[in-house]
Amino acid sequence: MISGIPGTGKSTFCRFLEARHGFAFYEVDRMKHWPNLADWESLLRRSLAEFVARFRELHPNGTVLEFGFDPGSQAPVARVLIQAGMRPIWFAGDHDRARQLFVARGTVPEVLFDKQVQRIKEADLPRSMPELQVVSAFREDGSVRAPEEIYAEILRSVA
C-alpha cells in the first residue's frame, strides 16, 4: 500500500512496479474504474482481510494499492488493511517541492493539495502511524529519486 504526500511520485512508483516487476496496480482514488467493481465493493464492505487476500489470490506476483487516504476519515481503514497484511509505504518529502510538482501536473486544483497536506499535518502523519515505512521521494538537492532507487531502499528494509 503506497500512501503519502501528494506530488511525491506515488503513482509513478506504482506504475514502475507494474511495468518492471509485474505487480497489479490499483488506485483507490479511481476505484470506480476497477474491473468487477461491484465484487470489490462487496468484499470491501464484508471484510478487509478478505479484500487483501483476494488481491494475493488474483495477483501472486504482487499487488500495489495506491491509497492517498484522508487522514481523518480513512486512517482506520488504512490501519485495518495493514493489519490484514498490506505492507504500508509512506512517500515523504519537502512540502514546497511536492507542491511545485503537483501544480506542474495541472490535473487537480492546487487548493486540494493544500487541503490534503493540512490534513496530513493535523493527523501528524507519518509519525502517528509508526507501522508506515517512510521513504523520501526527493534527494537533498530537491531532485526526484528514481523509482529503482526507492525500490532498492524498500527491499533493503525487508532483509
Image (tube, grey):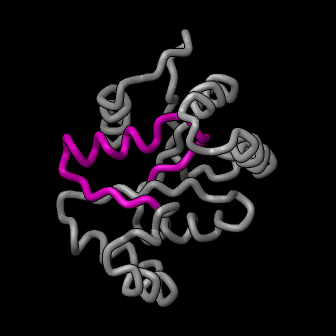
What is the x, y in percent for residue 145? 42, 23
Say above or below: 107 vs 97. below
Task: In the displayed orientation, state which residue is furthest to the top.
Answer: 141
Q: Residue at x 36, y 25 (%)?
A: 146
Q: Which residues are magenta?
A: 1-27
What is the x, y in percent for residue 53? 32, 76
Image side of residue 107 versus residue 109, left or right: left
Image side of residue 133 versus residue 117, left or right: left
Say above or below: 88 vs 159. below
Q: Quadrant of residue 104?
A: top right
97, 127: nearer the viewer: 97
Q: How many marks?
A: 0
Q: Residue at x 65, y 66 (%)?
A: 74
Q: Quadrant of residue 96?
A: top right
Image side of residue 93 versus residue 50, left or right: right
Task: In the displayed orientation, state which residue is furthest to the front.
Answer: 106
What is the x, y in percent for residue 51? 39, 78
107, 68: nearer the viewer: 107
Q: Residue at x 46, y 72 (%)?
A: 32
What is the x, y in percent for residue 151? 32, 35
113, 3: nearer the viewer: 113
Quadrant showing the C terminus: top left
Q: Is residue 62 magenta?
A: no
Q: Residue at x 74, y 62 (%)?
A: 72
Image side of residue 112 versus residue 14, left or right: right
Quadrant showing the N terminus: bottom left
Q: Is residue 14 magenta?
A: yes
